[in-house]
Image (cartoon, helix red, strand yellow):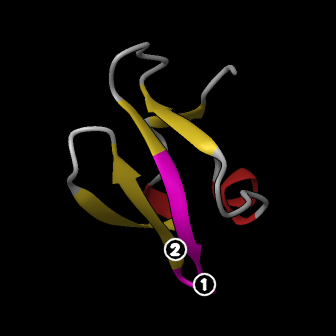
Amino acid sequence: MTSEQSKKLKIGQRVAWHDSETDLGTVEAIDWSGVKIVWANGKEQFLHHNNMGEIKTATP
């Protein structure tokens, strides 16, 4: 996803790593610099908007 797409994410939205059906996460927070994702395995990750190239919006 591009930086512009990342900035349009909403809290609670589901995302995936590389379109994976098993590496899923939920957007927990968004600010001017990036996005906090809580992954299904319990890990939390903060990614800057310009580093979201590996993230895709998950299909419901």
Regarding residue 51, the answer to whether it shows in the image is yes
Circle 1: residue type: Asp
Residue matched to label 2: 34
Quadrant where the C terminus is found in the figure = top right
- Between the residue at mark 1 and the residue at mark 2, the CA separation in whole angstroms equals 6 Å
Most frequent secondary structure within the magenta stretch: strand
**Vertical order, 30 against 10 (above or below):** below
Instruction: Give the residue drawn at x 66%, y 48%.
Output: 13
Instruction: Specify whether 16 is left or right of 43.
Output: right
28 magenta-colored: yes
Residue 23: x %, y % from top left: 33, 26
Identify the magenta region: 26-33
**Vertical order, 19 against 7 (above or below):** above
Residue 35: x %, y % from top left: 51, 68
Regarding residue 1, the answer to whether it shows in the image is no
The count of marks equals 2
Quadrant where the N terminus is found in the figure = top right
Residue matched to label 1: 31
Residue 27: x %, y % from top left: 54, 57
Graded by Cα atoms within 10 Å as few (under 14), some (14 to 19) or many (20 or more), the crowding at tag 2 reads: some
* SS at mark 1 in the image: loop
Residue 44: x %, y % from top left: 27, 61
* SS at mark 2 in the image: strand
Instruction: Give the residue drawn at x 43%, y 13%.
Output: 21
Instruction: Give the residue drawn at x 59%, y 40%.
Output: 14
- Quadrant of the image occupied by residue 31: bottom right
Observer-nearest of 53 and 19 = 19
Q: Are marks 1 and 2 in contact (CB under 8 Å)?
A: yes
Instruction: Specify whether 3 is left or right of 15.
Output: right
